[in-house]
Image (cartoon, grey):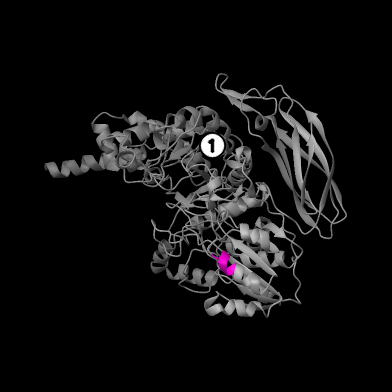
Amino acid sequence: MNKRLLFVIVESFFFFGVASAIDYSFHNTKLKDEKRVDIVLNQLTLDEKIALLSSNLGIPRLGIPNVGSVEGLHGLALNTVEMRHRIKNATPEQKEMMKRFYGSENPRECFTTTFPQAYGLGETWSPECVRRVGKQMAEEARYYYQSGLSPRKSLVIFAPNADLARDPRWGRTEESFGEDAFLTSCMTVAMVKGIQGDNPRYWKAASLMKHFLANSNEDSRDSSSSNFCNRLFREYYSYPFYRGIVDGGSRAFMASYNSWNGTPMCIHPCLKEVTRKEWGNNGIICTDGGAYQLLVNAHHAFKTMEEGAAAVIKAETSQFLDRYEPYVRKALELGLITEKDIDNAIRGNIYVALKLGLLDGKDSKNPYLEIGKDTTLTPPFMTAEARALAREVTEKSIVLLKNSGLLPLDLSKKILLTGPYADEVVYDWYSGAPDKAITLYEALKNIGADVTYIKDNYCDNAVEMARKADVVIVCTGNHPYGTKPDWKFCPVPSDGREANDRRSLQLPDEDVIRQLYAANPNTVLVLVSSFPYAINWSQEHLPAILHITHCSEEQGTALANVLFGKVNPAGRTTQTWPKDILDLPTMMDYDITHGRTYMYNDKPVLYPFGYGLSYTTFSYTNAKVLKKNKKEWVISVDVENVGKYDGDEVVQVYASFPKSKVERPKKKLCAFTREMIKKGEKKTIQLHIDTETLSYWDDAAHAFVLENTTTPLTIPYWEANQEKSLVIE
């Protein structure tokens, strides 16, 4: 026997020996989760371990299927380029399915239900709506993953964004639920629960929160440091992530590009010491895209890529969204890390795979496995229920900023509709693509309105038509990516997005609005924007102003329903709208006690946090405390709809701390609820306050501490366009 033949026999024996020696007991769902993870981890090769440091959870040799990640801030965002590649290589059967689903063998997109931007989701003040959005995204992720209609095998959804919009100049304000830590934590928990579902064993999809931590400047984000004390870390910047893990059940988040107090977040000790050991995140921590190499090239925290890779792994950051393999191998060779260090990092990835049901084998009891298997059924993004949900959420997101009696309109009015977003639904960087989107112009025609549409005021055409109309509706705002997909360029100073902070708070079209108003005082501004504007002239002069964010497939229908009174608006602002950019602290001042957010601002504002009007009037009486103990306070208040329209009301409760021995906010949201109240109806509303929201972080005690002092509670509301409030001692 020659040596070559002997080598082949030995190699074959070794290969089949390894294969036959695989321990598939990790399929056993009766074992504890950590035991199943151990069984998988203990039989991985070094190559497999290094491969698991990516965003792919699959281990093909063990029969664990590949699963990656997908964006999902306000609807699943599948890659359209990949979809076209999938169509090009589709089988005849798959092409027939696509033709049945999309009406064509060559659809442009992997369609998904598309909701308002996250900023708009926050303006619903409805965690239940946000939970249902998350549930819809997870349904569609499972559908595409299991139907084979997308080349992108993704069950880890990059959502929600738990960052806080501390400054309206932040380019990614659109991705945040708002400036308040408590409201954002409630929305974060709701989104996580919606995505992951309520099954005790399995997740429908995995919720990976973004971006930990204090990442609210785009300019210089690759190397900047967000500096603030540990109290603000606990009470403000990390609070939504904390609640997302502890209450929501998320076991994944993305570390941000920036540093906190000089240490880059993807290697910060708090990842291990706080989020893993204290909060219980035994799942994924991933870098942001390219953040690992920025440790060397931008932060200059290390001289070599090997040192940076070692630091990431030792911090138990478990996924690189970057090219990393050769540097990890070099770090091993140099002794900068051990294989055990890699084990400690990647076990969380295996745990997430377990929760998705990927470790179960063929006899899985995962209740989500049938989604997408029957391709004769209507896809989840094309159901009447999905479109109704998009419409409902969009309607609830609309904020009535001003109304002097012009709204709601009636169909007898002649309407001039103008503005760049009157007949266009614009999508942002992280949008999916709906199978159909309804613009405001289409929606007005659908309800039989007498409407004339002119896109802009070219040659004063819009001004001339305004004189002939009963009502003018101007639909304008920002463009989510600056009108062209150039990563480092926003041509309009007041526009902003990822990688670009805003340079202005002025609305570019306000001069056009002034001309239209001069021609016709019955002018309505529909502000379609991803963030606040200092629209001082419009607020002073125009009779009606609405705010809505971009991207919803039902944007037009929702707006039409509100404009004509079919729906009574009840959205609320989730950020302080300043009058003047000069009223803002410097951009890189992360100490919010220096006058930032409604909690510490002492300047006059255009619209306060939590503000929004209605077509009807609500009267508040009989506010009282029903229960008060160390864990929970329960209060009640009677709210009566004394106006002419049925409508939702957002009841908000704020705490103040006049006798505190430490610096506290001048007021702080601690409870809220959104309730439908019919005209003439009175409801007794109960609100539960977790006393942790009334507490402050004590570094010495390493805990939230509830002070034994009087904490007045205030319930603000608007009656006949006048701000009022009830105080509960």
The vertical placement of 244 against 447, above or below, is above
Quarter assignment of residue 341: top left
Residue under the image location 53 percent in, 61 percent down = 478
Q: Which residues are magenta?
A: 509-513
The vertical placement of 177 against 467, above or below, is above
Q: Could you say which is closer to the camera, residue 447 or residue 508?
A: 508
Q: Is residue 544 left or right of residue 217?
A: right
Q: Could you say which is closer to the camera, residue 529 or residue 89?
A: 529
> To which residue does mark 1 refer?
237
**Other-residue count near label 1 (Cα within 10 Å), few / some / many at <14 / 14–19 / ≥20:** many
Query: Would you say residue 418 sits in the magenta stretch?
Result: no
- Furthest toward the right, the residue is 680
x then y, percent, for residue 601: 61, 40
**Residue 340 seen in this snapshot:** yes
x then y, percent, for residue 671: 71, 39
Residue under the image location 22 percent in, 39 percent down = 10
Q: Is residue 109 left or right of residue 382?
A: left
Q: Amino acid at mark 1?
A: Tyr
- Helix, strand or loop under label 1: helix
Q: Quadrant of the C terminus?
A: top right
Quarter assignment of residue 19: top left
x then y, percent, for residue 422: 59, 70
Chief secondary structure of the magenta portion? helix
**Residue 385 seen in this snapshot:** no
Q: Could you say which is closer to the camera, residue 182 or residue 468?
A: 468
The vertical placement of 687 against 707, above or below, is below
Residue under the image location 45 percent in, 52 percent down = 498
The vertical placement of 262 against 405, above or below, is above
Q: Quadrant of the N terminus?
A: top left
